[in-house]
Image (spheres, rainbow, N blue to C red):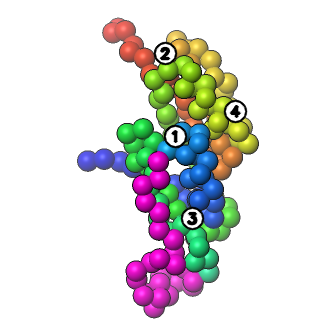
């Protein structure tokens, strides 16, 4: 079994995908817009009036790969008000150089919560919220000695 994050960007999905391609070397593996929905319009209407208000160019579903992890994303209901509370995504670059690059890229336009610095459990660790409101931890992976 696998657990995959699914992020609803409420109208900024395509912008976020382009940002993560640069910041995380992400690869977009699938993108479908609402206008490409194979379900007839009458079926969409049965989902409620809010479905009818979503711009057809909005991203209905996307998948992108960060390292070995598949992340799914959408514009959701395109409300313009994404909320990411109580969840943080963690990336584990294998080098300090890559950690610094990722941290700087992800924090561009966002808010640094804990600057990238050495800790007792990692040569470099930091936390931030990116410009889309997604919380991130950047942690250089290391083998912890046994206790």
In the visual, does 108 lie left or right of 67? right
Rounded to the nearest angstrom, the CA distance separating label 2 from label 4 is 20 Å
Q: Residue at x 33, y 9 (%)?
A: 146
- The residue indicated by pointer 1 is 25
Residue that protrudes farthest toward the left in the picture: 1
Sequence-wise, the earlier of marks 3 and 1 is 1
The label nearer to you, 1 versus 2, is 1
Sequence-wise, the earlier of marks 2 and 4 is 4
Rounded to the nearest angstrom, the CA distance separating label 2 from label 3 is 36 Å
In the visual, does 140 lie left or right of 127? left
Rounded to the nearest angstrom, the CA distance separating label 1 from label 4 is 20 Å
Circle 1: is it few (<14), some (14-19), or many (20+) Cα within 10 Å? some
Q: Callout 2: helix, strand or loop?
A: loop
Rendering quarter of residue 66:
top left
Rounded to the nearest angstrom, the CA distance separating label 3 from label 1 is 21 Å
**Looking at the image, residue 114 lies above or below residue 86:** above
Q: Residue at x 56, y 53 (%)?
A: 17
The label nearer to you, 2 versus 3, is 3
Relative depth, front residue between 87 and 103: 103
Relative depth, front residue between 129 and 61: 61
Q: Are marks 2 and 4 in contact (CB under 8 Å)?
A: no
Rendering quarter of residue 30:
bottom left
Q: Is residue 45 magenta?
A: yes
Q: Residue at x 54, y 67 (%)?
A: 59
Rendering coords of residue 31 (x, y %)? 47, 63
- The residue indicated by pointer 2 is 121
- The residue indicated by pointer 4 is 112
């Amino acid at each position: 079994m696998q657990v995959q994050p699914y992020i609803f960007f409420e109208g900024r999905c395509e912008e976020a995908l382009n940002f993560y391609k640069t910041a995380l070397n992400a690869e977009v593996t699938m993108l479908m817009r609402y206008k490409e929905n194979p379900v007839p319009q009458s079926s969409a209407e049965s989902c409620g009036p809010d479905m009818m208000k979503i711009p057809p160019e909005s991203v209905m579903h996307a998948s992108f790969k960060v390292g070995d992890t598949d992340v799914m994303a959408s514009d959701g209901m395109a409300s313009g008000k994404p909320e990411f509370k109580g969840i943080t995504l963690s990336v584990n670059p294998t080098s300090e150089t890559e950690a610094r690059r990722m941290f700087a890229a992800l924090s561009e336009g966002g808010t640094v919560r804990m600057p990238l610095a050495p800790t007792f459990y990692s040569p470099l660790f930091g936390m931030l919220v990116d410009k889309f409101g997604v919380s991130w931890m950047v942690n250089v992976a290391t083998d912890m000695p046994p206790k």
